[in-house]
Image (cartoon, rainbow, N blue to C red):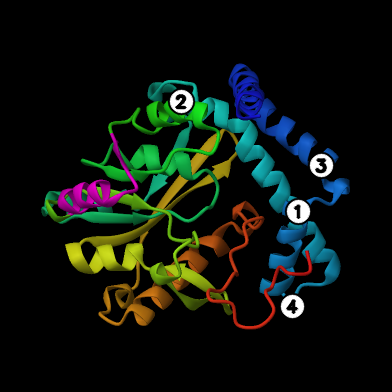
């Protein structure tokens, strides 16, 4: 099955890479419209999340936002051939605007490490690639479930100069040394870790959810500057935005730091709500306290 999935995904990537970016994105939106009536798991999770986070919206507005979110995710999938299969010289031409990069560059000039917190907004692969051009970048890498995609993803993510290390103790140690020495690292701050000892239940957009402590711990241990960043999808390419995390993220109290982290993610999300990955079960809590939010799906 893994081999069949690989060839299906590789074919889709190859097709999308042959199409102009605008056409590839349109293909994604068409596929999303065909997918929507099926009512599969990701659609239901998207609706569940949006109804919980935006209770003040009318049911019609919630439904419309859910549809736009599914379409944005489909655009992400069908534009990925442009990001993973084409050279960095081409991908960089799709970055039409960058704001706030001086935050990273100034820290680098001062010899201070930077931890870039990149929520699942727009195309996070693009912001990771751009980060590699701003300084010596080391990031954690976990091979995909479709193992044969691994070499494609590794090559693409290192195309702009970044170095990937495995998500084990040796990889983490290398990453910490790099950041302590003034380097850059990128972390996805809105993934729920599997280990119940690796996170805390902290509110995000007003709803408790299991939030990983990796970023918070790394910021404290390295003295790095914490910066949020995302690549918003715009006509013809991407707009990258970097912004400082609030001071609370440096707090010794982990709960205080994680609350600041989640508020930072929320600020990024609200700048382009429909491009957030709402189909992810973000509002899981561990250990579970009562009925889970997604039990009825």
Q: Position of residue 287 (x, y in %)?
A: 53, 76
Question: How far apart in space, not on screen, are marks 3 and 4 (Cα)?
Answer: 27 Å
Q: Circle 2 — which element?
A: helix
Picture quadrant where residue 135 is located: top left
Q: Circle 3 — which element?
A: helix
Q: Position of residue 196 (x, y in %)?
A: 45, 70
Which range of residues does the magenta coloring cover?
162-179
In this figure, which residue is indicated by the disc labeled 3?
Answer: 35
Q: Nearer the viewer, mark 1 or mark 4?
A: 1
Q: Circle 4 — which element?
A: loop
Q: Earlier in the sequence, mark 1 or mark 4?
A: 1
Question: How far apart in space, not on screen, are marks 1 and 4 (Cα)?
Answer: 24 Å
In this figure, which residue is indicated by the disc labeled 4?
Answer: 56
Residue 222 drawn above or below residue 288: above
In this figure, which residue is indicated by the disc labeled 1?
Answer: 41
Picture quadrant where residue 13 is located: top right
Q: Residues within 10 Å of mark 4 (few under 14, many from 20)?
A: few
**Is residue 74 shown left or right of residue 57?**
left
In this figure, which residue is indicated by the disc labeled 2?
Answer: 152
Q: Earlier in the sequence, mark 1 or mark 3?
A: 3
């Amino acid at each position: 099955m893994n081999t069949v999935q690989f060839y299906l995904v590789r074919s889709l990537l190859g097709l999308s890479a042959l199409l102009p970016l605008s056409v590839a994105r349109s293909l994604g939106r068409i596929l999303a419209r065909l997918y929507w009536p099926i009512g599969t798991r990701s659609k239901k999770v998207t609706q569940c999340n949006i109804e919980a986070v935006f209770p003040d919206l009318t049911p019609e507005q919630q439904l419309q936002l859910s549809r736009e979110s599914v379409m944005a995710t489909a655009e992400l999938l069908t534009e990925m051939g442009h990001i993973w299969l084409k050279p960095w010289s081409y991908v960089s031409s799709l970055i039409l605007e960058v704001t706030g990069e001086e935050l990273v560059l100034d820290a680098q000039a001062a010899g201070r490490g930077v931890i870039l917190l990149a929520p699942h907004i727009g195309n996070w692969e693009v912001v990771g690639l751009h980060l590699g051009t701003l300084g010596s970048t080391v990031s954690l890498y976990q091979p995909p479930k479709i193992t044969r995609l691994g070499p494609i993803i590794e090559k693409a993510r290192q195309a702009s100069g970044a170095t990937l290390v495995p998500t084990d103790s040796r990889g983490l140690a290398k990453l910490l040394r790099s950041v302590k020495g003034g380097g850059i690292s990128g972390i996805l701050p809105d993934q729920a870790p599997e280990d119940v000892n690796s996170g805390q239940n902290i509110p995000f957009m007003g709803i408790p959810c299991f939030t990983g402590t990796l970023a918070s711990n790394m910021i404290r241990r390295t003295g790095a500057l914490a910066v949020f960043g995302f690549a918003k999808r715009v006509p013809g390419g991407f707009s990258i935005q970097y912004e400082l995390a609030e001071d609370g993220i440096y707090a010794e109290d982990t709960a205080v730091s994680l609350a600041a982290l989640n508020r930072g993610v929320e600020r990024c999300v609200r700048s382009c709500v429909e491009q957030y990955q709402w189909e992810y079960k973000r509002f899981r809590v561990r250990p579970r306290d009562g009925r889970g939010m997604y039990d009825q799906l």
